[in-house]
Image: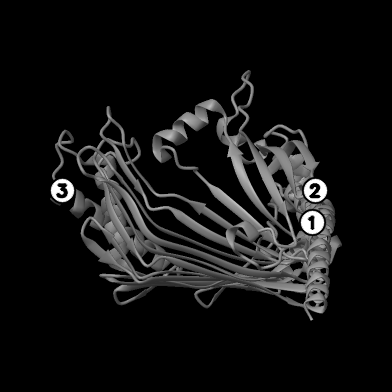
Amino acid sequence: MNKGFFSVKRKVLIAASASVVVLVAGYVGGAYFAGQAAETTLQKQHEWLASLPYFIVKDRSYQRGWFSSTETTTLQLNPAFYCFALEKEGAPLPKFEVTYTQRITHGPLPLLTHFNLHPYKAVVSTDFVFAPETQKLLSSFFGEQKPITLENRIGFSDDGVMQITMPSFEHEEALSGIKAKWQGLSATVDYGGDFNRVKFDASVPGLDVRLKDGKGISFSQLIVTSNHQRGKSGLMLGANAVKLGSLKVDLPAGLLTYLPQGLNAQVDGPRYQGSVTENGELIDGTARFNIDKITLSGKPYGPAELITSARHLHGPTLAKLGDAFTALQKQATTCNDYPTQVAKLAREQGMPLLTHDPQLAIEKLEVKLPDGAIRFNGKVGLKGFQPGDLDKPVEFVKKLNANADFVVPRKVVETVIAWQATRMFGGADSGISQADLDYLAGQFVEGQINRLANQKLIRVEGDMLAATADLKEGAFTLNGARVPMPWEQPAKVENSKPEAKQAGK
């Protein structure tokens, strides 16, 4: 009996040992093949990153091991995005570079040491290496903390999730007395294979910067979201939104030259919502901006709303132009040449955007003020346009349809003119009292309003000023009155008296 028992036990041990060997061999082989697959996936992600207009890849290396690999890349910020501000004649344009190292842990269980049994093709952690001067500056804010942490968990279908975090900090400048409190950043990027699906969520609890006298700038509860999928034309379609709890600005007089009297303002509930949709080959886009309340120097304004749209845009042309603009931005060119090349590109490849009855519109602009509300809406579009119409100005205008309608409180116009007069002529050294300035501004506004109303350029509707303009099939009307176009003006007849005298001889 004992002999049989030990025989069975030995067989079980042999089977168990063989199973362990098979599992270990399978895992080792799986890690090797996962490493190969991860390298292919990261090559795709690198190509996607290199295709973006924001960066130029200066260097990249990849060392693949059995269980882990290392990738090192150096990126340069594309000078096309900052040369307009920093380019100086005779001086080289500064370069902004960052090097990052990605440490890739191969699947199938790359998080096993973290007691996480979720299978992935690979898990990638990224470390950034900054220039010594930049690192010194960042260390003064973040201390020993990493300024940014990025982890990328890649699935077996090349889909994945990136987690991006920035730690919070509190910083104070010893000499200036400026204090800064940054409450960190947390972001998630959920993407599909080849980045044909991207969902992004980010949040920043707040930032507060204080001057020595206690004034400063702060914001709270910044939330950014987007959800896009690639459409048939190659463009990313979907929705995005940005929301801010509040923005406070309190700047002392004399801090900025263009704000000699300082600024005290608060914006509550600013937010943005945008969407892009596809209908066949045509693209429609809308954008909506809202503000709950604006407070300037203690005076409340708002709410405010702006809705804009772009419709009937040719999708394949937009995609083609996007690729061409990106290629142009990556070329070595000067800032002076760039606008010319952009105009040439738009002229040569952008014509189909005009031949599909495009329409741009401000569907609604409304700002509520203590003295009333400012309202505006307008749109402009083309109907039946053909490329040859660009050489025929009259035909082009006949195919251009546009209209606009606005209403503004009379008191608002008076207040703006009075404010400008105070900035130009007021002050302690001007010798002109504020009451006199207000009176002169009021008289000026009254005269201008009467003149414009007599010319039927505006309508006076009680305490409101309004105007309506319409252009359709080459006919232009303003406030209901037909206004002749330049080519409709009667031709001037030259004085024929000399000819009459000659004929009478």
Per the model, the C-alpha gap separating discs 3 and 2 is 80 Å
| Residue annotated with mark 3 | 434
Amino acid type for the residue under numbered disc 2 = Trp
Per the model, the C-alpha gap separating discs 1 and 2 is 7 Å
Amino acid type for the residue under numbered disc 3 = Gln
- Single out the mark in the foreground, 3 or 1: 1
How many other residues sit within 10 Å of disc 2, few (<14), some (14-19) or many (≥20)? some
- Single out the mark in the foreground, 3 or 2: 2
| Residue annotated with mark 2 | 66
- Depicted 149 relative to depicted 116: above or below: above
| Residue annotated with mark 1 | 31
Q: Earlier in the sequence, mark 3 or mark 2?
A: 2
Q: Position of residue 285 (x, y in %)?
A: 64, 71
SS state under label 3: helix
The residue shown at (71%, 39%) is: 73
Q: Is residue 286 visible?
A: no
The N terminus sits in image quarter:
bottom right
Q: Verify CB contact (< 8 Å) between mark 1 and mark 2.
A: yes
Q: Earlier in the sequence, mark 1 or mark 2?
A: 1
